[in-house]
Amino acid sequence: MNILYERFPESVKVNGEYYLVITDFREWLRFAELVEDDSVPWQIKCRLLLQWYTDRIPDDIEAAIYALGDFFTCKKMYQEDSEEEEEEQKRIKPVFSFSEDAGCIYAAFREAYGIDLQKVNYMHWFEFRSLFDWLPDSTEIKQRIMYRAIDPGTVQDENERKRIKKIQRAIALKQKRHKMNDYEIGDMFS
C-alpha cells in the first residue's frame, strides 16, 4: 500500500473475508506486550489476542491469529518479503522493545514530530509505525537500535569494539524474548 494516497486498513482478511479490528496504536502496543509476555500460556494468549477483533471473530482461529500478526507487523504497508528474508528476520535479535524503550520512543515523538503520545486521542497503528520507523537517526531510540544491531565481531578496531560492547551492555534489552516458530503455533491449534 502507498500511505500517501491509500487509507490505513480498518480490517484484516481471513480466508477471503474481511474482519474489523481495533486500530489505535495504544492497543497494538498492548498487543506487543501480550505477545512478549512469557508468563501467559499460549492457548490463553491466543484467546486474549482475539479481542482485537471488534465485530466478530473468524472461525479459523489459526488464520485469525496470523492475520493479527500481519496487521501488527504492518505487512500490508511494507512490501512483502520473500520466505528467505522472513527466515533471516526471525534469526535477527530484537533491537527494540515497545515496553522497555517506551520512554525513548515517547521522547523521540516529542522531539522529532512535536507529538505528545499521551495527549493524542487516536492514532492508527500504521501511522504510528510509519512515524516510528522513520524517526531521525539522531534520536535516542534510533541510536539504541543502531548499537544493539551492531555485531561487535565485525568491528576491526579493538578499542572501538570494546566501546560498542560496553554501550550494548548498558542498553541491552532485559526481557526474555521468545518468538514462536511455525511448529509452536501449529501446536496451539492441535
Image: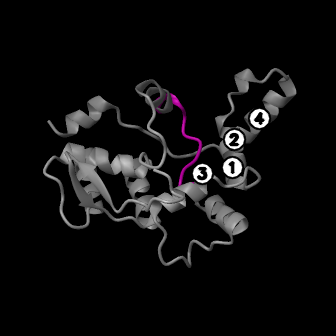
The stretch in magenta equals: 90-100
Q: Are marks 1 and 2 in contact (CB under 8 Å)?
A: yes
Residue at 22% of width from left, 34% of height from top?
Answer: 186
Residue at 49% of width from left, 32% of height from top?
Answer: 89
Q: In this figure, which residue is indicated by the disc labeled 2? A: 146
Going by the picture, which residue comes out furthest to the front? 5
Question: Residue 163 location, x and y as percent?
Answer: 81, 35
The nearer-to-camera label among 1 and 3 is: 3
Q: Is residue 129 visible?
A: yes
Q: Is residue 101 visible?
A: no
**What whole-number distance in Å separates the C-alpha atoms at marks 1 and 2?**
6 Å
Label 3 neighbourhood size at 10 Å, few (<14), some (14-19), many (20+)? Answer: few
User: Hey, which quadrant is residue 106 in on the image?
Assistant: bottom right
Residue at 44% of width from left, 31% of height from top?
Answer: 86
Q: In this figure, which residue is indicated by the disc labeled 3? A: 133
Q: Main secondary structure of the magenta part?
A: loop
Sequence-first tag of 1 and 3: 3
Q: In this figure, which residue is indicated by the disc labeled 4? A: 164
The nearer-to-camera label among 4 and 2 is: 2
